Amino acid sequence: MTDFFSKRIFFVSISILLIVAAACQRANVTYQHIAEPFELDYKVDRSEEEIKKFEQEDATKGITKEQVILYGSSSWRLWKDMATDLAPLPVVNRGFGGSTIPELIHYAERTVISHQPKVLVVYGGENDLSGKKFKSAEQFFDSYRDFVSLIQQRSPKTHICFVSMKLSPSRRQYWAEVTKGNQMVKAFSTGKRLSYVDINPALFHPNGTVKSELYTKDSLHINPQGYREYAKILVPFLQKKYK
């Protein structure tokens, strides 16, 4: 996969990682954004109907705390066999819409925090970085840091695991920014209750070409075979965090 990392990205990333590493040492200091604020070009409550369905489900089934919640965009929402693929982990699917990190923040209280999950598995950022309005990796990272701060304040015992943004074939023009964003989150995700897991190796052949057989026709979303490849990485990784 060396094609994905140009020399320009490498040197820019090194500088960014130094900033991130310094931020990691300031756990008790309020996070200071490293980029200009991003003005949303969509309504942050646009997935209200989906969230209401989650609330109805919680009201009907009751809330079981200390489970594994997968929270994020359609990469989770479309994983229909999640419970089977990720067994024996006690998983709850809270993927919705084409959500972005600001939306995950907006709905966290209603969808995640009430569950006080033991592990929160986050998939987000890909939609942030491929929207109609350009958003930089730094702006995405600021949003993610805000999200982490919220969860750490409201559910301090929750382990937050960020699953790498995939390099989707249909969004090849965004790969450089996605790669940079992944690197930033990876550098930040250290310590007792933060981690990062890379699922991209499962989506590429050793020679760096895309495993197109793991995608649906849109070359964006993963098919059932692709999700089973995800599970091969996620299950052993998450089992260690769920102890």
Image (tube, rainbow, N blue to C red):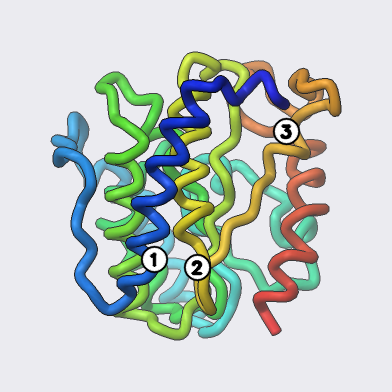
* Mark 3 burial class by Cα count in 10 Å: few <14, some 14-19, many 20+: some
For the view shown, which residue lies furthest in the right direction?
A: 206
Amino acid tagged 3:
Asn
Between residue 142 and residue 61, name the one nearer to us.
Answer: 142
Left or right, residue 67 beside residue 231: left
Q: Which residue is mark 1?
A: 24
Q: Is residue 95 placed above or below 178 in the rendered structure?
A: below
The amino acid sitting under disc 2 is Ile
Return the disc, 1 or 2, that comes first in the chain's sequence.
1
Q: Which corner quadrant holds the C terminus?
A: bottom right
Q: Nearer the viewer, residue 117 or 50?
A: 117
Q: What residue do we see at 77% from left, 39% from top? A: 202
Gap between marks 3 and 2 measured at Cα? 25 Å
Report the disc number at residue 160: 2
Point out the tag, 3 or 2, that comes first from the N-terminus. Answer: 2
Near mark 1 (Cα within 10 A), the count class, few <14, some 14-19 or many ≥20, is some
Tell me the distance, in whole angstroms, between the alpha carbons under discs 1 and 3. Answer: 36 Å
